[in-house]
Image (cartoon, helix red, strand yellow):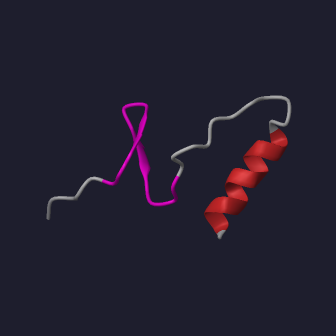
Amino acid sequence: SQFHNAVAQICALNAGMELNVDGLDGEKEVCDGQVVPPQDEEI
């Protein structure tokens, strides 16, 4: 998937660093510096 390809590219570009990718998910979003499930949008 595009999400997994993007993660692989980030890891490859930062090969000298140990990145924590546990819990990454294409459906999640960043809110206040935390990776969280998407919030329901009020209509």
Query: What is the span of residues highlighted in magenta in the rendered image?
Result: 25-38
Residue nearest the observer in this picture, 18 or 27: 18
Which quadrant is the N terminus positioned in? bottom right
Question: Where residue 41 sits in the image (x, y, percent)?
Answer: 22, 59
Vertical position of residue 10 compared to residue 3: above or below: above
Q: Is residue 14 left or right of residue 27?
A: right
> Where, by quadrant of the figure, is residue 12 drawn?
top right
Question: Where residue 8 sits in the image (x, y, percent)?
Answer: 75, 53
Question: Where residue 39 sits in the image (x, y, percent)?
Answer: 27, 53
At x 78%, y 29%, the residue is 17
Q: Is residue 42 left or right of residue 21?
A: left
> Where, by quadrant of the figure, is residue 3 drawn?
bottom right
Q: Is residue 31 left or right of residue 15?
A: left
- The residue lying furthest to the front in this view is 22
- 9 falls in the magenta region: no
At x 42%, y 49%, the residue is 29
- The residue lying furthest to the left in this view is 43
At x 35%, y 51%, the residue is 37
How many numbered badges does the structure rendering display?
A: 0
Vertical position of residue 21 compared to residue 7: above or below: above
Q: Is residue 31 left or right of residue 3?
A: left
Which quadrant is the C terminus positioned in? bottom left
Question: Where residue 35 sits in the image (x, y, percent)?
Answer: 43, 41
